[in-house]
Image: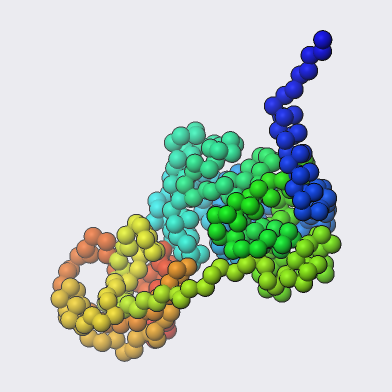
């Protein structure tokens, strides 16, 4: 009688092998072709000199992955360097105030990322003895870290075999395997996750993960993809069928809601008044300008709330700003307060010089308005 010793790792390996084989037969592809070609291409032609590469520091990798969510690499590089200079460690980030963290994030957008990053740092210091957790499931419990971001961190920092599926990867897989349907729907996303899991290599996870990101960011782009030089074009179904520009299936278009508001630029000499926005919602926790409904009598409201005033020499032009789900039209109203009602600042309000205000944690549209005011006043 023979005794067979089978370890859990072997069982997982066997299951994964058969899953890849079945999927490959169904889709008529060689199991190793996609991963091996991608790894080889990344090592030779991929990106290797980004500020957050060539390190296994999970903190540095984590910060970069959060910044890169819905933001181009070129926009992130400058912010990343300044952020890491000010907050070089998890402890430094956790010890800072949310106000300062938002200030160093100001202009990068999607500010909930910064708030989650700060809270996650506090959680790591409180519950994980200041050490970034290595367990994949535990990483996902940190605020602002979903499955794909956790996988990227685990892959780059700890060389774990994990699956990423960000927007770029969804586009690559949808084209390569000719998967129709908007990737944002649960059914299509689930299908892409399953597919992505079957493509994982046994080794070279860092090169493979980075290669997926590089391919989607540099060659398999949303518009003007460079298919002739793609390392996996010979097995790309969309390329074979001349359907690259049709995939992935676009999100069903809906009319973008629009909203118009007034923003009060209240001046006192060379100072401007800012108000703290609520912690949740658009621009949560940032300093901004007082807002009024578009049809409100701004002169009467200012007189009642803030005091006697006179019109400024000129107000900045109307400004429009697009969010993910709606478009905001801002009508600025610049006024000089001649007899302020309050001698002291009220809670949630602050008077700053225009120069200091431009350096504060303010939304991008507000920074644009104040920069225009500064030009007018010069």
The quadrant of the picture occupied by the N terminus is top right
Q: Where is residue 268 drawn, in percent x and y?
A: 27, 77
Position of residue 238 in the picture relative to residue 270 (left or right): right
Q: How is the image coloured?
A: rainbow
**Quadrant assignment, res 178:** bottom right
Q: Where is residue 72 drawn, in percent x and y?
A: 60, 65
The quadrant of the picture occupied by the C terminus is bottom left
Q: Nearer the viewer, residue 229 or 76?
A: 229
Q: Farthest front residue?
A: 26
Residue lying at 44% horizontally and 36% vertically, measured from the top left = 126
Is any part of residue 258 visible from this angle? yes
**Quadrant assignment, res 215:** bottom right
Residue lying at 77% horizontally and 59% vertically, measured from the top left = 46
**Quadrant assignment, res 122:** top left
Q: Where is residue 327 drawn, in percent x and y?
A: 43, 75
Position of residue 2 relative to residue 212, above or below, is above
Position of residue 367 in the picture relative to residue 155 (left or right): left
Position of residue 340 relative to residue 123, above or below, is below
Q: Nearer the viewer, residue 344 or 201?
A: 201
Position of residue 154 relative to residue 316, above or below, is above
Is any part of residue 270 visible from this angle? no
Q: Farthest bottom residue?
A: 313
Q: Nearer the viewer, residue 58 or 141?
A: 141
Q: Where is residue 362 drawn, in percent x and y?
A: 40, 67
Q: Nearer the viewer, residue 8 or 349?
A: 8
């Amino acid at each position: 009688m023979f005794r067979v010793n089978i370890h859990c790792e072997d069982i997982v390996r066997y299951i994964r092998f058969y899953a890849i084989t079945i999927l490959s037969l169904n889709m008529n592809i060689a199991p190793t072709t996609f991963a091996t070609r991608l790894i080889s291409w990344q090592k030779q032609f991929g990106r290797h000199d980004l500020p957050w590469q060539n390190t296994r520091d999970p903190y540095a990798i984590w910060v970069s992955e959060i910044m890169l969510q819905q933001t181009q690499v070129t926009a992130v590089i400058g912010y990343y360097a300044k952020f890491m200079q000010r907050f070089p460690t998890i402890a430094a980030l956790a010890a800072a105030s949310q106000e300062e963290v938002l200030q160093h994030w100001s202009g990068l957008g999607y500010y909930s990322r910064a708030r989650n990053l700060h809270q996650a740092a506090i959680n790591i210091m409180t519950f994980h003895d200041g050490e970034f957790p290595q367990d994949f499931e535990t990483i996902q419990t940190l605020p602002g870290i979903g499955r794909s971001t956790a996988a990227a961190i685990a892959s780059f920092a700890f060389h774990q075999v994990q699956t990423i599926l960000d927007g770029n990867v969804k586009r690559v897989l949808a084209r390569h395997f000719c998967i129709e349907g908007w990737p944002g729907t649960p059914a299509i996303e689930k299908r892409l996750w399953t597919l992505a899991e079957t493509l994982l290599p046994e080794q070279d996870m860092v090169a493979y993960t980075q290669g997926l990101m590089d391919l989607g960011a540099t060659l398999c782009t949303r518009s003007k993809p460079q298919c002739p030089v793609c390392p996996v074009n010979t097995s790309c179904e969309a390329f074979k069928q001349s359907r690259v520009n049709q995939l992935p299936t676009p999100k069903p278009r809906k009319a973008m809601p629009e909203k118009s508001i007034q923003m009060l630029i209240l001046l006192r000499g060379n100072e401007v008044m800012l108000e703290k926005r609520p912690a949740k919602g658009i621009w949560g926790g940032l300093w901004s300008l007082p807002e009024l409904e578009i049809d409100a009598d701004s002169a009467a409201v200012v007189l009642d709330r803030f005091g006697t005033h006179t019109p400024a020499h000129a107000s900045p032009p109307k400004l429009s700003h697009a969010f993910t789900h709606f478009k905001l039209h801002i009508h600025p109203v610049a006024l000089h307060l001649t007899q302020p009602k309050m001698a002291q600042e009220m809670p949630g309000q602050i008077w700053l010089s225009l120069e200091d205000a431009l350096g504060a944690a303010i939304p991008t549209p507000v920074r644009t308005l104040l920069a225009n005011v500064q030009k007018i006043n010069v």
